[in-house]
Structure formats: C-alpha cells, structure tokens
Image (cartoon, rainbow, N blue to C red):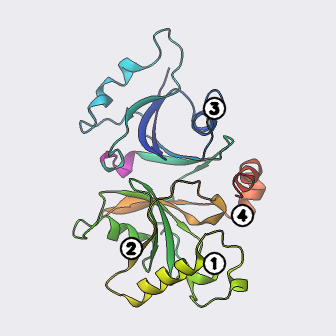
Amino acid sequence: MNAHLYLSLSPEALIASHLTPEEFGAYLAIGSRHHSSGQALFFELDPAWRTDAIPAMAAIEARMPHADGSPRKSRYISIYRVLEHVPPGVIGDLHLATPDGRVLSLAAAKAGQPPFNDNSRHHLYQEYCPIRPRVVSMLDPAGFCAHITDPAQPVSVPRIAFAELTLGALAGNLDASADELGNLPYAGIVHLRDCLREVSERPDKPTKVLVRNISDNVLYRTIKGGFYVGDRAGLKYYPMPSRVDLDARHHAWWQSALNSFGG
C-alpha cells in the first residue's frame, strides 16, 4: 500500500496519506464526517524524499497503515517550519480544493517558462506559507520572491509559497475610478490605494503589508497568473488556467469555486 506525501499550505503541515490527491483534498476540505469545511491548498511531494531535518520522517513507514491494516487518511509528520526543509526539486503538483471538496491540480510550468508577467506597475500578493499576510509590491513575482527570501532584509523567510491576486485597473492606474475597478472583492479599497501609492513613491520600500494575516478563504477568481513557491535560488511557477479554460475543462470545480464564498 503506497503512501503519498503532502505539504499542506493552510495550515503548514507535512502529512503522509494513503489517499489520492482528489481523495485527500476532499478529506481536508470537508472532513471524513462532514464536521469541518474549508478551502485546502497542498503540494504533492516525492514520496521517496526524506530529510534528517524532520526526525519523524524516519518512522513514516512504521506508522502506516493502521494496526488493522486499513489505509490511513492522514499521518501528521510535522506542523512547524516544514516548507524551509523541502527542496523545490521534490515539490510536485499543486492541488486546490474548494470547500465542498472538489480538487483542481496544477502542474509546474516547464523549465524555461517564465513566471506570469503582464508588465503591471503594481502587484498584490497573498502569502500562504510559512506566513499569511497580504502584501502590495512594485516587484514582479520573481523579484518579490527574491526580496522576501533575502536574509539581508530586516524581515525574511527561507522559502515562500504565494499567489498573485488581481488588482484590476489599479495595476496600472492608482487613480482609476470605482467604475473602472469593476468587481474587485476586497475590503478597504481606499486603504489598498494608499498602500499602493506608498510603495510607488518609496523606491527604498518595494513592499508593504496590506493585511497582516488572512484567515478566510481566498477567492480563486482573484488569482492572477498563478501560484509560486521559491527562494533566492529560484522560483517554481504553477500557472492558473484561464477562466475560459476553467469553464470548459474544469467546469464542476470552477462552479464550485464560484459558489463557495462568492468564488
């Protein structure tokens, strides 16, 4: 009975499981007895990967399966400082589960495919792991990752998983009218403008925290370009399908995402 190895981003945890990604996503999102509900994001890791930095990994096989031989839904291996010990090379597909348990799997971009960049002047990022603030920045995804993982900065992390969120017309024009902004689903648009204006006027401060910690589900319809995981050595990019592609090829997941907390 083969075990999968998963890195959950919300919250951060290293978990072994006999469930497939689709089964595991549903398990995380709705629970085995429908007592819990919530969005889930997790990477599948190379199941053969091991590290001495996480001592409990040495006993994975001995703790799986159950004593009666039945499959184990989840065996938590570590819940603290996991991502920094996971080499990018062992990180596989990213799986996005809606609150009702439907799973969309994203593969990393092929080698040489650059991160999404539409030449926007301003950016909005949602960090997922190991910290969860929402941040505005003048840096593109690659620049942002390099900046936030630079130990020379006053505040940094060894490795970061994050997504870029849409800013609509604010990406190029901080004076865009309410009509031009359209349906941006963020609270505090005035505060958002002010933070964007501050980083645009401060070359020495290319990022600023907009919201210190996001505990609610992030609306999948706000994802711009895709998801990222990386450090100073490089960046892995997981492209998000277009809305047309989501509706045509992943219709059930997309409708579930749109109907869950407004998408």
Q: Is residue 52 left or right of residue 125?
A: left
In this figure, which residue is indicated by the disc labeled 1?
168
Q: Earlier in the sequence, mark 4 or mark 3?
A: 3
Q: Which mark is residue 47?
A: none
Q: Tell me the kind of residue under disc 3.
A: His
**Are the residues tagged 4 and 1 within 8 Å (C-beta)?**
no
Q: Tell me the kind of residue under disc 2.
A: Gly
Q: Is residue 205 left or right of residue 73?
A: left
| Element assignment for label 1 | helix
**Picture residue at 43% right of the left edge, 20% below the top:** 64
In this figure, which residue is indicated by the disc labeled 3?
35
Q: Position of residue 109 (x, y in %)?
A: 51, 59
| Mark 4 neighbour density, 10 Å: few (under 14) some (14–19) many (20 or more) | few
Q: Which mark is residue 143?
A: 2
Q: Earlier in the sequence, mark 3 or mark 1?
A: 3
| Element assignment for label 4 | helix
What is the span of residues highlighted in magenta in the rendered image?
85-90
Q: Tell me the kind of residue under disc 4.
A: Arg
Q: Nearer the viewer, residue 80 or 59?
A: 80
Q: Nearer the viewer, residue 263 or 227?
A: 263
Disc 3 or disc 1, which is closer to the eye?
Answer: 3
In this figure, which residue is indicated by the disc labeled 4?
243
Q: Earlier in the sequence, mark 4 or mark 1?
A: 1
| Element assignment for label 3 | loop
**Picture residue at 29% right of the left edge, 57% below the top:** 158
Q: Nearer the viewer, residue 164 or 241?
A: 164
Q: Tell me the kind of residue under disc 1.
A: Gly
Disc 2 or disc 3, which is closer to the eye?
Answer: 3
Can you tell which quarter of the image residue 240 is in? bottom right
